[in-house]
Each structure stands twice: as C-alpha cells, then as structure tokens.
Image (cartoon, rainbow, N blue to C red):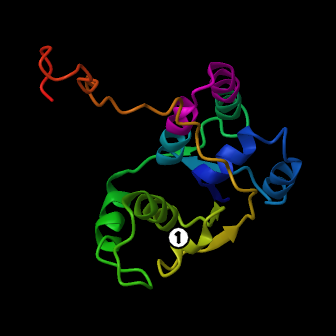
Amino acid sequence: MSILDSDVLLALIRSTEDDGVVEFVKQFPSRPQTTALAIAEVTAAIYAATDPRLRSIRDRALQDLLRGLLHRRVLPLDADSAITLAKLATTKNATGSYYPLGVLIQAAISRQFMMPLVTGRAGDYQGLDLELHPLTLDPVPAPDPGPVPVPVLGPVSAPDRRPPGTGGTG
C-alpha cells in the first residue's frame, strides 16, 4: 500500500487533463491510501479557486475520489502518529531549517503506518527517512487571486489656479 499526498490528489482530480497520473497510481499493487491532512489541503485549494464552475467541478471530483478509489482509505493523525510527529519536529532539513508542519504530518503518518509516500514534491521530504515514490507532475498554476485591489489614496485636491487677489492662495 502507499499514501497519496495532496499534490497527487490534485493531479488525480485534474486527471482528465493528464491521464499519466492515473496510470502512475494504477502501477501500485494495492489500492492507495491518503491522509486527512491531504484531504484538507486539497479542499482548501479547491475553495481558493475564484471560478465557481471550476470549484464545483473539482469539489465533485474530490467527492467522487473519496467515494471510489479512496473509500474508507483516509488515514488520521492518531496518537501514535502525533508522537512520531513530535520526534520528527526536531529534525532540520539540508539547509538547516525545520521542516514545515504539513510535511512533518505527512511524514509521521507515512512512517507510523509504514507505507511509502507518493508525492510530487519528493525534495520536501528528503532527510526524513521515508520511502518515497516521486511523481513528476505538470506545474499547477497558482490559484487566481481574483481582481487586484486598487489602493485607495483618499481625496485628491486640485491645485488652486485662481489669480492672486481673487481668493486664491498663490
């Protein structure tokens, strides 16, 4: 068995655009699992979309995935995984920084359940002693942030152009 991270789930949701992801997942001998964190990350990405039609399509695709391929296959962050997470939290990556919490949660669950992690971001997990199955994904465009707000500068007064001695200041 293997665990699919949020990048792979997003790719599966968009699989109508890239059948290679579906074929990659099918190569594993048993049905995959995912984590509650991955579901939360994917749901957040779906609801960040500003296009309601796209949001609806992807939300429906996620629900279909959870009722189909991933039915009853969502792993929790349980007490044992939380202890593993706490131990991993002291680990620094190659640059000397601590790993992001989301990476640590996925790693802890993967280690606790002794399952390889299928991810599009294998580099994020380097140094955490995990079995990884890297998947090369097409870059996902950043969510549309919507209209760019125009800064409000307040009222702008025009210079007084009246001739001197007629009430002007100049």
Residue 154 in the image, given as x and y percentages of width and height: 25, 26
Task: Please name the residue that numbered disc 1 is placed on.
Answer: 124
Residue density around tag 1, few if under 14, some if 14–19, many if 20 or more, within 10 Å: some
Direction from residue 13 to residue 21 in the image, left or right: right
From this view, report whether residue 139 is shown above or below residue 151.
below
Instruction: Point out the image quarter for the N terminus.
Output: bottom right
The furthest residue to the top: 166
68 or 19, nearer to the observer: 19
Q: Secondary structure at mark 1?
A: helix
99 or 159, nearer to the observer: 159
Direction from residue 16 to residue 34 in the image, left or right: left
Residue occupying image coordinates x 54% and y 75%: 130
Residue 146 in the image, given as x and y percentages of width and height: 54, 30
Residue range (magenta): 43-60
Magenta stretch: helix, strand or loop mostly: helix
Based on the displayed image, in which of its 4 quarters is residue 96 positioned?
bottom left
Residue occupying image coordinates x 70% and y 34%: 65
Residue 9 in the image, given as x and y percentages of width and height: 66, 46
Magenta stretch: includes residue 54: yes
